[in-house]
């Protein structure tokens, strides 16, 4: 039997053909699985994790130059109990990498009783610190005072730490003004009447004078 469209005027057959074509397309669309036409989007979270992992593979130059604290920190991290989220955030913000701070501290007993000193402080993520104190009126190496111990977080708003030596002797009480500046609240059992600061340095000073000392077990 000849197609129906052969008996229709051309002006009437065109709408019928268009309607049949639309029905055919609708049937094909129903056969496609859900999301067939969805364009895949980047997963920003996974991308960020991947980039972070890539950065962690290569150790920062400051960590390589430090010379203490890294190995002990890795061992302790493997067997240490989980820390509170607040403390984890504190460490991630300011104490997750080695840092060296430098500043000048005047004689806090009496201006005529002692010399001003230049203090270098280096802290490692594993809880260790080392310092070098140099009297400005006698900067010879033999007059350098080098010390080491463990640091401990004692407050988080703002971030505050204690520098402790052997037998729990406190070297200093410090506040992070920001991630790169420390305010001295107390040093050598003396509270300054004015504000004195230690500022972060670009290069890490490992305080090599103490390299022969036994490694400290902190935290």
Image (tube, rainbow, N blue to C red):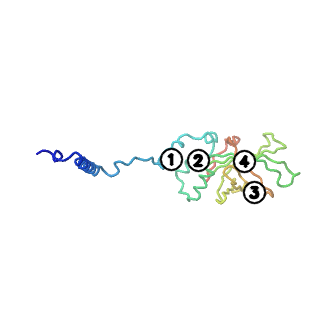
* Label 4: element kind: strand
Q: What is the CA distance from the residue labelled 2 to the residue labelled 1?
A: 28 Å
Tag nearer the camera, 2 or 1: 1
Mark 2 / mark 1, whichever is N-terminal: 1
Tag nearer the camera, 3 or 1: 1
Screen quadrant of the N terminus = top left
Q: Nearer the viewer, residue 212 or 209?
A: 209
Q: Which residue is mark 1?
A: 48
User: Residue pushed farthest left?
Assistant: 1
Q: Could you classify mark 4 by the number of other residues whose Cα lies within 10 Å: few (under 14), some (14-19), or many (20 or more)?
A: some
Q: Position of residue 186 (x, y in %)?
A: 75, 57
Q: Could you classify mark 1 by the number of other residues whose Cα lies within 10 Å: few (under 14), some (14-19), or many (20 or more)?
A: few
Q: Which residue is mark 3?
A: 186
Q: Which picture quadrant has residue 203? A: top right
**Which residue is rendered at x = 51% and y = 44% of the image?**
51
Q: Which residue is mark 4?
A: 199
């Amino acid at each position: 039997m000849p197609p129906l469209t052969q008996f229709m005027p051309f002006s009437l057959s065109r709408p019928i053909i268009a309607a049949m074509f639309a029905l055919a397309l609708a049937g094909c669309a129903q056969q496609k699985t859900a999301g067939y036409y969805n364009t895949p989007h980047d997963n920003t979270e996974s991308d960020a994790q991947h980039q972070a992992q890539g950065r962690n593979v290569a150790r920062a130059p400051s960590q390589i130059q430090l010379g203490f604290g890294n190995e002990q920190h890795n061992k302790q991290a493997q067997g240490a109990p989980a820390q509170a989220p607040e403390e984890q955030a504190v460490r991630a913000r300011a104490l997750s990498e080695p840092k060296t701070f430098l500043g000048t501290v005047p004689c806090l007993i009496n201006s005529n009783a002692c010399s001003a000193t230049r203090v270098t402080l280096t802290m490692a993520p594993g809880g260790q610190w080392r310092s070098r104190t140099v009297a400005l009126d006698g900067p010879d190496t033999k007059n350098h005072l080098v010390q080491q111990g463990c640091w401990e977080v004692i407050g988080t708003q703002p971030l505050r730490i204690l520098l402790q030596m052997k037998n729990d002797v406190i070297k200093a009480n410090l506040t992070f003004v920001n991630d790169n500046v420390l305010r001295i609240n107390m040093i050598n059992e003396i509270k300054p009447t004015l504000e004195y600061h230690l500022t972060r340095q670009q290069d890490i000073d490992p305080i090599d004078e103490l390299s022969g000392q036994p490694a400290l077990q902190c935290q």
